[in-house]
Amino acid sequence: MPIITTRSPTRPHNIMVVDDNPANLKLLEEMLRQHGYEVRSFPRGRLALAAAEKSPPDLILLDINMPEMNGYEVCERLKSSASLSGVPVIFLSALNSVEDKVKGFQAGGLDYIPKPFQFEEVQSRVETHLKLRHAQDAEHDLLERTLGGAISTIWELVQLTSPSLALRTGSIRDLVLCVTQRVKVKDAWQFELAATLCLIGCIALPEDVFERAYSGACLSPVEAEMFRAHPERASLLISKIPRLEVVAEIIRGQQKPGSTVLHLALELDRRIYRGAVSGTALAELRTLNRFDH
């Protein structure tokens, strides 16, 4: 899962100021530092973007009319970056028409202060957005820890209930991690979680039934139906956990040929479980056009 990096409570907030006017840069820098902020100032958007990528600020005060790259473009670049998209941007500009402000908000800005500005207003807006960001980070951090705790509890339940199930789950997860890292799958954490939880619906199966079903051995009609239903059972359970709706859908579709990385990992692991060497199992999947990487 994506990890939130929160600011240390003992470290001052870091503000980035971007303006091609040296007088504005100096004024804002001095006043913000007087209020206890760490400040980095840049006369060009390109320089600010490079610095932000190396060390993300807590908030950015951004001019619009600048050479090389205007403030709208800088903001759009920030919002397209996974590591910087959450940084609050406040525009400071002499462009005061409604159209200019709308364009600023469409680019991803959270606020718009017209020039010439009063520093008291700038300070007030900065403080407000920093407090909002802190509250959002705290809420996100709580959700991450709650979600992590729920997944850990489910995984412990699998280990306690069925060692065989836990062993196969671990193998599937390792395969999924290998594939997603190799082909650089977007949102790989969703597939990792889906692999961790994909067999949770088999907990209700007796261990011997699961082992026979997974190996492809003969099952009674009732046993076969129970095994076929496990993805749906797992999906319904996982879909009740916030933020795991996509993971639930991946789990639901795990038995559909060629549907996802998870299906490929399951097919490979089942062949290995039946005694095939991993290279042979992989070659077989390739001949079936189920694995292209």
Image (cartoon, helix red, strand yellow):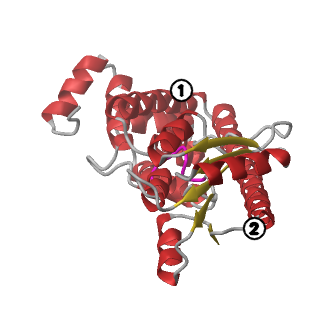
Q: CA distance from mark 1 to mark 2?
A: 64 Å
Q: Amino acid at mark 1?
A: Leu
Disc 2 marks which amino acid? Gln
For this rendering, which residue is in front, 152 or 123? Answer: 123
Residue nearest the viewer, comparing 96 with 133: 96
- Residue 70 is at least partly visible in this image: yes
Q: Residues within 10 Å of mark 2 (few under 14, many from 20)?
A: few
Q: Position of residue 131 (x, y in %)?
A: 79, 58
Quadrant location of the N terminus?
top right
Residue 53: percent from the left, percent from the top? 52, 38
From where the camera sits, is residue 229 visible? no
- The reply to whether the magenta stretch includes residue 3 is no
Q: Is residue 109 above or below residue 263?
A: below
Which numbered mark, 1 or 2, is in the foreground of this view? 2
For the record, the magenta segment spans 80-86
Disc 1, SS = helix
Q: Is residue 39 left or right of residue 173?
A: right
According to the picture, the residue beneath numbered tag 2 turns out to be: 118
- Nearer the observer, 157 or 274: 157
Residue, x 86% and y 36% (percent of image)? Answer: 10
Identify which residue is drawn at 74% across, 63% down.
122
Mark drawn on residue 167: 1
- Specify whether residue 84 is painted magenta: yes
Label 1 or label 2, whichever comes before in sequence order: 2
